[in-house]
Every structure is written in structure tokens, then in C-alpha cells.
Image (cartoon, rainbow, N blue to C red):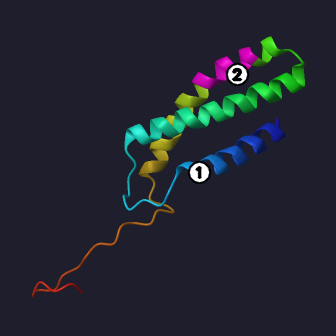
Amino acid sequence: MIIICFLEIIILILHNKILISKCTKNMEQKRRSILKAVTWRMTGTVDTIVISFLLTGKMTTALSIGGIEVFTKMLLYYAHERIWNKVKFGKILPHKQVYNDYGSEI
């Protein structure tokens, strides 16, 4: 179980490195979170099916486990992503221009 969690964390980190580029926007659109949830779940489900097959030796059991978890974890990931999108910790806010009374940038 610990190995599965560790592998999923590694895959999540790699997934985010590939999919997320530096953005000037502070917030992500909901459709971006949905796309990330779908691509992450495809990756995670393949991982779950492979691990389930290695543990059980039965492809039907592995596919059943993967088929169930693909939906539950996609919904959980989307909710998790939207909550974290509201957290300011670790975000770099866009530079705000400040002007003096004469209209010159400070």
C-alpha cells in the first residue's frame, strides 16, 4: 500500500512538471483543472491496473479495480485541485504596477 501511494505521488509530480508551464495568471480555469484531472486519472489508472495485476495475477480483477477507481479518484482530484487553487500558499502573484500621483510608475 505504501509503495502504491509512493508511486502515485511520483507520477503526479512528473505529470504536473509536464503539463504545467509557468503562467502569468494567478488562477486556473476550471476546464484546465478538468483536463488535468482526466490526464492524471488515465496515468493513474494504468498504474493501478498494472499494480493490481502484479498483485493478483488476474487481469479481470485488475481491470475491475482500475474501472472503479478511475471515476472516484477523478472526482476527488478535481475537488482537491479546486480547493488548492484557492490557497495562496506557494503562489507567485503577478506583478502589480504602482503609480505615483503624477502617473509615473514607481
The CA distance from mark 1 to mark 2 is: 23 Å
Residue type indicated by callout 2:
Gly
Q: How many marks?
A: 2
Q: Which mark is residue 18?
A: 1
Q: Main secondary structure of the magenta part?
A: helix
Above or below, 48 against 64 in this view is: below
The secondary structure type at the circle numbered 2 is helix
In-image side of 36 versus 86 (left or right): right
Q: Position of residue 10 (x, y in %)?
A: 72, 48
Q: What's the magenta region? A: 63-71
Q: 10 Å neighbourhood of mark 2: few (<14), some, or many (≥20)? A: many
Residue type indicated by callout 1:
Ile
Give the camera-side residue of 92 and 63.
63
The secondary structure type at the circle numbered 1 is helix
Q: Position of residue 97 (x, y in %)?
A: 25, 76
In-image side of 102 versus 10 (left or right): left
Above or below, 71 against 95 in this view is: above
In-image side of 64 versus 98 (left or right): right
Residue 70 within the magenta-colored segment of the rendering: yes
Quadrant into which the C terminus falls: bottom left
In-image side of 6 versus 82 (left or right): right
Examine the rendering and report whether any part of residue 4 can be seen. Answer: yes
